[in-house]
Amino acid sequence: MRAAILTAALLLAGTAPVHAADARELSKAIDARLAAAHKATGAKPAPRAEPHELLRRIYLDVLGRIPTPEEATAFLNDPSADKHHKLIDSLLAHPELPVYWRGVFNQWLNGTLEEKRPGEAEFLDYLEQRLRDNAGWDAVARELLDPNAADPVSAQAAYFLTSRLAGGDRAAQLDSITVAVSSSLFGVQMQCAKCHDHPTVGDWKQENYYGLAAFFAGTYTEKGKTNLPALAERAPGEVKFTGRNTGERTARLLFLDGKVIDAKAGRRRALVGAGVTADGPYFKRAMANRMWRQFTGVGLVEPVDQIHDGNPATHPELLNDLATDFAQHGFDLRRLMGGILHSEAYLRSSRYTGPGPRPADSTYTVAALKPLSPPQLALALAQATGHTETLRAKYEREKAKLKLETVTFGAVRKQFEKEREHAALLARFKQEGEAFRASAAHALYLTYNPAVRAMLSPNGLVGKLAKQPEEGEVARVLYLTALSRPPSTEEAAAVAKHLAAPGVAREELCRDAVWALISGSEFRFNH
């Protein structure tokens, strides 16, 4: 019966799994590579994570949110040994996946933009639609570089380049485009080769930087059909640069692999032909490495946009396997996701019990502890406090004004992203650089900020718990809602003792209990 309930819940979540069986073959290849590496070094991999840990991990990584209490209960009560595999396949086909991943891809592509530009909302819609279509990453990249203005969906992709053509002089615009394209699409940082040959990477010469910039020499913006900036291309002038020992030179159309391209017009299309291919190493390796890092917490190459011979992968054969499989299967993003998610490398516990010191995350012997990203944390806070249900009721009342046919959870999270409280949470928990740094300011923010305190109102989980007379049920609902697991015996006893404090209103005691869980490390990390 319980298994039937889980099956029904998963079927309601979305459509049939995408390439589920094929993805398992990629998972086996991943595990074989890492098993060989562990054998060679004598490393002992951690066992598989506990079911409740996998439940929360998979939801956060695939949908960017924590499971609802109902989803958690259905999963935890299912006796099936392969229930985590079924969950992965179901969530890969879940309608919320494009809603979450549009933000992930936007961060990958446009995270370096200093401010929002006209067309961002439409660009997010574009990413969501292409992810919903399960369009190949190569097809998406073609539209990013050379969008079809006649196609209403493809035209929205122009934001990737038009946002870099707003403001600044022409040299600054070309620099912004060159850096964005090389980094996000090809996994290469070219800035250090702008003024001279790269000081530490022999492959990157000054002519490589300007050779890539030359593909955009004729690109400019004009008003599109929707009054948003659109891309156009005129007969380009020459891109010139001055070398330290060579004087002024005219840049050739030169791709990263050293191939000189002959194209008088349609230079961006020529770049697509030269770079967005299955046989070239840069395009396929860049996404394979980014996706691997997204799920495991550490890239096979770090940083992810510095893939070059001087910075080899920790497991080069594995990176090659992932990239080759990705290209051979039509740059299918869901297949790549599924291959990593179904692997034992992804499913390992984050607990290390020895012997010896904890291995480096880059060995993939133990799962890495990953701090929740700001968007994940903002939504998790809203869910764990019951604020999303308050928002759902609000949006239901405003459905006509918001032009919503139905108020699904996906619609709620998209509207929540437009709220000022969401922006405030993102700003507060934004991380500078790659390292996670929890601070006293974070804890104080969760304690005193008006937006967070509003989430801890009687309208949400706090009120629900305060009305529950049974302390054991309070503990069960609290832990299941916030941490996706039942409380231990000791935790349930601690909750009961807390609720028995004399002279304090039950509502206040419940508020403190919810706050304690959402402020703790178990909540802040994906483990």
Image (spheres, rainbow, N blue to C red):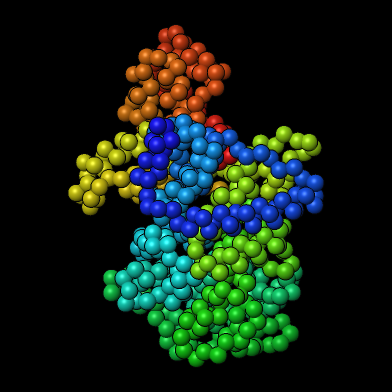
Percent position of residue 200, x then y: 75, 69
Number of dots carrying numbers:
0
Q: Is residue 163 left or right of residue 337?
A: left
- In this view, the residue in front, 389 or 492, is 492
**The C terminus is located in which quarter?**
top right
Residue at 51 percent across and 24 percent down: it is 487
Q: Is residue 116 left or right of residue 522?
A: left
- In this view, the residue in front, 72 or 490, is 72
Q: Is residue 318 visible?
A: yes
Q: In the current view of this chain or complex, which residue is farthest to the top? A: 502
Q: Is residue 229 visible?
A: no
Percent position of residue 473, x then y: 42, 19
- In this view, the residue in front, 151 or 458, is 151
Rendered position, 25 above or below 284: above
Rendered position, 288 above or below 241: above
Residue at 40 percent across and 41 percent down: it is 7
Q: Quadrant of residue 143?
A: bottom left
Residue at 54 percent across and 56 percent down: it is 23
Q: Is residue 178 left or right of residue 167?
A: right
Percent position of residue 21, x then y: 51, 55
Residue at 77 percent across and 45 percent down: it is 43
- In this view, the residue in front, 133 or 452, is 133
